[in-house]
Image: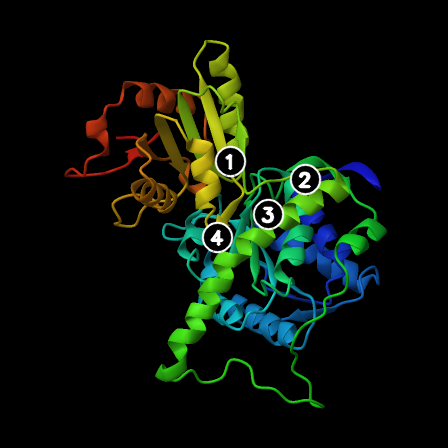
Amino acid sequence: MIGRRGIEVSLAIAEAAKLCRVEVISAYPITPQTHIVEHLSELVADGDLEASYITVESEHSALSACVGAAATGARTFTSSSSQGLELMHEILFVASGMRLPIVMAAANRALSAPLNIWNDHSDVMAARDTGWIMLFCTNGQEALDSIIIAYKIAEDRRVLMPVMVNIDGFTLTHVVEPVEFPAQETVDAFLPPYSPAYTLHPDKPVTMGAYGIPEIYTECKFAQETAMNNSKEVVIEVLDAFGKQFGRPYKVAETYQLEDADVVFIALGAMNENIMTAIDEMRTEEKKAGLVNLRLYRPFPGEELLALLKGKKRIAVVERVMPGGALNSPLFNEITSLAYRSGLTALIKNYVIALGGRDALQSDFRHIFDDMQQASAKDTRIKKGLNFAMIGVRA
């Protein structure tokens, strides 16, 4: 190990891409992800990273350039956020459908309108079904490690899928944290040079992303979905291997004070650290709260989550995104669908919190705990009006 140093998380992500020896970078600046690719441009310009840095006129073009680069066999990196991620939306499907192992750092930010540059998960949730493997990070160390992990997963011949590493905008991207940096030789041993199965090359022409007539389109999409679902085993395998090599073990879903919890929180991203702090406070008052921190969102780790929730009676699903007219928010819908199919009988409630960068306060989680304790089975029934609890909204 090189050792620990204080660094802005955005710069740590850029340094992680350097440690992965990325060969092509293409991105377009948008708050709050700009520092990531800005630092990468400096590393390339200063000769510290041997890579091609492609400047483009939009995020749509940025991901299009990455698709072309990845198709030639280059290890490719990009980054985006919010409206930029949505401008990429069309090409997100192209990257996954062509089975290209691109890695993207998504600095999660609210979507307009109204214009807001702060954090919530509306951007990634709008892109959740585009066929990308999706990881979420709680802190800066996880952000650095997840970039390395993402390439190991994406480039595995059993996977060959793009991976999106989600980092909460400002909440993580712009804070300075102590981060442990691995030595280059350690990363090289874990992540050897990318060896693609097929590449675009004039000496051996191939066709990629060809016209999919009705007679073959269904089979192509079924094969893609099968590969996505099967990738979960590779994700688990890579997380385990990373832990053994780097001394920082990760799981697809991690727990905190779960064993005897009367109320279980489930959430994504940096908010989990706020929840852990609230749990510590509540535990001093003999309020038995626990947490399941979902690191992997796509493919959804249903079996692993069920094993953790077995026997639990009250589950609070806390999200930073509006349902957009659905009965409930995206993560809640996943978990209740899982519960229905598996016979999980817990009382599960949906809470929306901290949109557009509003603080997620310890008092908010204490309120959720008390609300869950007082809730009865009737709270799960579909009723007129909102089917989720809005925390902190001013009436």
Quadrant of res 22? bottom right
Q: Position of residue 285 (x, y in %)?
A: 46, 9
Earlier-in-chain disc, 1 versus 2: 2
**Mark 2, other Cα within 10 Å: few <14 / some 14–19 / many ≥20:** some
Report how far apart the C-alphas of labels 4 and 2 lie in the structure: 21 Å
* Residue name at image x 74 percent, y 51 percent: 15
Report how far apart the C-alphas of labels 1 and 2 lie in the structure: 15 Å
Given contact means CB atoms under 8 Å apart, are the residues at marks 2 and 3 in contact?
A: no
Quadrant (top left/top right/bottom left/bottom right) for the N terminus: top right
The label nearer to you, 4 versus 3, is 3
Residue named by callout 2: 141
Height in image: 194 above or below 218? above
Quadrant of res 80? bottom right
Between residues 8 and 337, which one lies in front from this camera angle? Answer: 337
Q: Secondary structure at mark 1?
A: strand
Give the numbered dot on residue 236. 3
